[in-house]
Amino acid sequence: MYLYRKALRESLFKGRSIRGIVCASVYYACRSSKIPLTISEISEKLNCPERKIKLNFSKLIKILKLKSPLISPEIYIPKYCRELKLPYEIETQTILLLQKTPHSFFNGKNPRTCIGGLIYYTCKNNSHSKTQVEIAEVTETTDVSIRSRYRELKILFENNL
């Protein structure tokens, strides 16, 4: 809550809701600590609209002159595999596959859809039955996005083998 106290001390958020500032501070802390919580999860758990968290997060970064911590897509793999009740082997193979994936693959794409595609690709290659819909529900994306990433990965890895 250091960020919240700092913002409060400097009176940077006059007229803003306390809950919104706290939620934005929590989201920043999660990102900088590499804790895989999304804005929608924080919004649900702390009962604050996503829009308010996003707005306060961007203001927090701008006003306090912070750097927005980048999140490696790798931190979401264990979380999603656990929620999908996948074996540890699938998780490790997905992480290895992610490390082989060029960074350009993620450019302009939602990291959750890319991770979902990687998990689906790994499941298909290991004859493990998880549907695109199941993976999409866990990654909070659509089955169409998972299918698109899967096809792109299939082409990418078949050309590199």
Image (cartoon, rainbow, N blue to C red):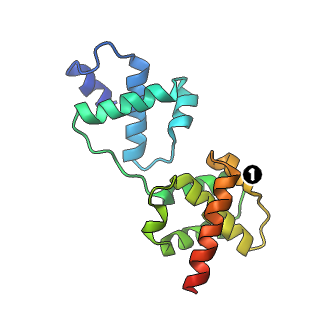
The disc labelled 1 sits on which kind of residue?
Val
Q: Where is residue 36 in the image (x, y as percent from the top left)?
A: 50, 48
What residue is shown at x 21% (from left), y 37% (from top)? Answer: 65
What residue is shown at x 47% (from left), y 47% (from top)? Answer: 35
Please give left or right for residue 153 compared with residue 103 in the image: right
Q: In which quarter of the image is the C terminus?
A: bottom right
**Front-lying residue, 145 or 59:** 145
Crowding at label 1, few (<14), some or many (≥20) Cα neighbours within 10 Å? some
**Front-lying residue, 27 or 135:** 135
Q: What element carries label 1?
A: helix
Determine the image quadrant of residue 144: bottom right
**Residue named by callout 1:** 133
What residue is shown at x 47% (from left), y 28% (from top)? Answer: 51
* Relative vertical location of residue 28 with respect to residue 97 in this rendering, above or below: above
What residue is shown at x 51% (from left), y 23% (from top)? Answer: 48
Please give left or right for residue 54 compared with residue 137 in the image: left
Residue extending farthest to the top is 15
Residue extending farthest to the bottom is 161
* Relative vertical location of residue 94 with respect to residue 32 in this rendering, above or below: below
**Front-lying residue, 71 or 85:** 71
